[in-house]
Image (spheres, rainbow, N blue to C red):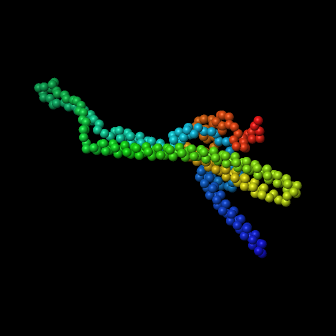
């Protein structure tokens, strides 16, 4: 009875963990639907596969200029500042030109001698009590405020874009690390299975648990990479789903991008994940 109660307690604790993870999974699925505009009706038995190739090298300055050009907030502030500048320049002590003309009434005796008068009058106000000067100063202050807000948002956008590009690169390295870790756990599990088949061990031990943990780490790394890609697309004025497309940065920039930027790139780190990872450098 005591042993049975202990087992039942463990079962219920396991069920609690399962229910919590199921609820967390549902929340993540709803978030996934919002980001990708893709309904998820069935179960996600197969997790998304990580990208096969490293993300291409991008000229950061070109990317920043593209983001500034496509950002609606910056465009609205620039148009507002331009409008205030035009209104400011149109306010001041400007000359006023008036045209006039008339014809004098003639009599019967002098019908052929009608009097005509026409001309122009130029008036320039010298003093208006400072009304127009104050209005001009007020518009100039508003324009300066809008330009300051424009600069703050522009710098914030540049900072966020740099941060997201770096975060996306880190997410890719996280995928490489998770792949290498999973490869190690897979080899260890294979070795453990052979020992089990030879009846040299009685169970698979921690090898199976570590392999499952390695799979989970790879799924999390892949998710982090796709989330960073979606956020990068939003900063560039695109929908989050656009960031999940392969080569979307090259399409936006109108360039054919390559992972190494068209230059020779030596092995990085251990070389894992590169096409020549099993080749030893001479």
Q: Residue 28 location, x and y as percent?
A: 63, 56
Q: Residue 40 location, x and y as percent?
A: 64, 53
Is residue 72 visible in the rendered image? The answer is: no
Residue reaching furthest front? 282
Q: Residue 121 location, x and y as percent?
A: 23, 33
Is residue 125 visible in the rendered image? The answer is: yes
- Check the image and report above or below for 33 versus 125: below
Instruction: Count the marks.
Output: 0
Nearer to the camera, 189 or 267:
267
The picture quadrant where one finds residue 27 is: bottom right
- Check the image and report above or below for 12 versus 43: below
Identify the residue at image location x=79%, y=53%: 189
Identify the residue at image location x=27%, y=44%: 130
Q: Is residue 217 left or right of residue 90?
A: right
Q: Is residue 3 left or right of residue 263?
A: right
Identify the residue at image location x=41%, y=40%: 82
User: The C terminus appears in which quarter of the rendering?
Assistant: top right
Q: Is residue 196 left or right of residue 222?
A: right
The picture quadrant where one finds residue 110 is: top left
Q: Residue 139 location, x and y as percent?
A: 36, 44
Residue reaching furthest right? 198
Identify the residue at image location x=54%, y=45%: 159
Nearer to the camera, 111 or 15:
15
């Amino acid at each position: 009875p005591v042993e049975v109660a202990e087992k039942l307690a463990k079962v219920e604790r396991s069920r609690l963990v399962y229910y919590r993870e199921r609820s967390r999974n549902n929340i993540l699925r709803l978030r996934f639907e919002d980001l990708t505009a893709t309904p998820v009706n069935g179960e996600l038995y197969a997790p998304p596969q990580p990208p096969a190739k490293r993300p291409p090298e991008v000229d950061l300055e070109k990317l920043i200029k593209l983001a500034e050009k496509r950002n609606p907030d910056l465009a609205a502030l620039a148009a507002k500042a331009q409008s205030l500048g035009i209104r400011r320049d149109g306010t001041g002590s400007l000359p006023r030109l008036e045209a006039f003309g008339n014809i004098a009434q003639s009599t019967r005796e002098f019908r052929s001698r009608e009097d005509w008068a026409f001309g122009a009058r130029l008036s320039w106000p010298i003093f208006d009590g400072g009304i127009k000067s104050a209005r001009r100063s007020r518009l100039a202050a508003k324009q300066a405020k809008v330009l300051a807000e424009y600069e703050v948002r522009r710098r914030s956008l540049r900072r966020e874009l740099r941060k997201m590009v770096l975060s996306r690169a880190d997410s890719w390295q996280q995928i490489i690390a998770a792949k290498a870790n999973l490869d190690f756990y897979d080899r260890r599990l294979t070795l453990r299975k052979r020992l089990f088949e030879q009846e040299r061990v009685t169970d698979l031990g921690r090898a199976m648990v570590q392999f499952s943990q390695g799979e989970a780490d790879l799924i999390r790394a892949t998710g982090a990479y796709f989330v960073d890609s979606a956020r990068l697309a939003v900063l560039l004025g695109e929908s989050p789903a656009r960031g999940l497309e392969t080569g979307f940065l090259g399409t936006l920039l109108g360039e054919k991008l390559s992972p190494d930027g068209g230059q020779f790139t030596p092995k990085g780190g251990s070389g894992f994940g590169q096409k020549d990872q099993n080749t030893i450098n001479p």
